[in-house]
Each structure stands twice: as C-alpha cells, then as structure tokens.
C-alpha cells in the first residue's frame, strides 16, 4: 500500500509495516485472490486516501457498498455546507448589517 499511496500511507500508518499486527489480524481470513480484487477495486475507483484495515477487508470481500455510501455521504454533506455558506453571502443582508454597524459606530462617536 505504501507504493500506491506514498506519504499518505506512512502518515496514516507509520514507516514500519503493521507493527501491531492489526492488518494481519483483520485480513487473516481473506484469501490472496480477494486481496488482489480489493487492490484492483481501490485503484479502479481512484481512492485518494488509503482505507483502514476493516474498510479494506470489506472491499476485499465485495462489501463495497459501505465504502461507496460513506464517500457519497461525505460529498453530499460538503455540497450542503457550501450551499449554506453561499446563502449566507446574501448581498442585501450584508448591506443591512453594515448599515447597522455604521449607525452604532456613529452613535458611539457622539457620546
């Protein structure tokens, strides 16, 4: 995986491959063919960040619905947040706010 993901892999999992044997334990019942299918899946989908051991196990076993659903939900949430930010940029609301602030500042100066 470090060849595929480079610094993203070492940033997430360190320089030493599987020192605490989590990946080994997680993938114990996964066959070599299933692992190769899992690797093929993550490269075909262009996954930019390495999956966790449990996520990779699900991908190897063909349980990719979970991963795809998770990515889809994150994209939808990001788009929803962007729309909310854009809605808050209402020019009339901004002009009204500036006007109120200017009136308050003028009132403070006259005191």
Image (cartoon, helix red, strand yellow):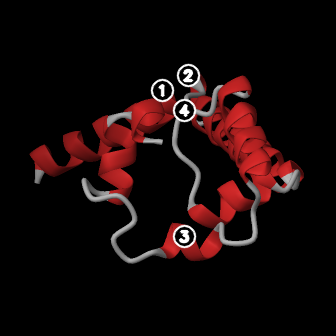
Q: Earlier in the sequence, mark 3 or mark 4?
A: 3
Location of the C terminus (image quadrant): bottom left
Q: Are marks 2 and 1 in contact (CB under 8 Å)?
A: yes
Q: Is any part of residue 73 visible from this angle?
A: no
Q: Earlier in the sequence, mark 3 or mark 1?
A: 3
The residue pinned by badge 2 equals 91
Q: Are marks 3 and 1 in contact (CB under 8 Å)?
A: no
Q: Earlier in the sequence, mark 3 or mark 2?
A: 3
Within 10 Å of disc 1 (Cα), the crowding (few <14, some 14-19, many 20+) is few
* Vertical comparison of 101 with 98: above or below: below
Of the residues tagged 3 and 4, which is closer to the observer? Answer: 3
Within 10 Å of disc 3 (Cα), the crowding (few <14, some 14-19, many 20+) is few
- Residue 109 in percent (x, y) is at 11, 44
Q: CA distance from mark 3 to mark 1?
A: 60 Å
Q: Is residue 101 left or right of residue 58?
A: left
Q: Which mark is residue 24?
A: 3
Viewer-closest of 87 and 79: 79
Of the residues tagged 3 and 2, which is closer to the observer? Answer: 3
Viewer-closest of 74 and 103: 74
Viewer-closest of 31 and 39: 31
Q: Which mark is residue 38?
A: none
The residue pinned by badge 1 equals 95
Q: CA distance from mark 3 to mark 4?
A: 23 Å
Most extreme residue toward the front is 32
- Residue 49 in percent (x, y) is at 52, 40
Q: CA distance from mark 3 to mark 2?
A: 56 Å
What SS does tag 3 mark?
helix
Q: Are marks 3 and 2 in contact (CB under 8 Å)?
A: no
Query: Which residue is painted at 48% across and 42% down in the image?
Result: 1
Query: Which residue is painted at 65% across and 28% down in the image?
Result: 43
């Amino acid at each position: 995986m470090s060849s595929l993901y480079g610094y993203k892999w070492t940033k997430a999992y360190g320089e030493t491959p599987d020192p605490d044997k989590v990946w080994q334990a997680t993938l114990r019942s996964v066959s070599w063919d299933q692992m190769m299918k899992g690797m093929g899946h993550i490269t075909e989908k262009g996954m930019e960040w390495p999956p966790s051991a449990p996520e990779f196990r699900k991908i190897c076993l063909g349980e990719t619905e979970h991963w795809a659903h998770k990515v889809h939900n994150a994209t939808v949430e990001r788009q929803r947040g962007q729309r909310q930010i854009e809605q808050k940029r209402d020019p009339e609301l901004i002009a009204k706010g500036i006007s109120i602030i200017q009136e308050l500042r003028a009132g403070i100066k006259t005191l």
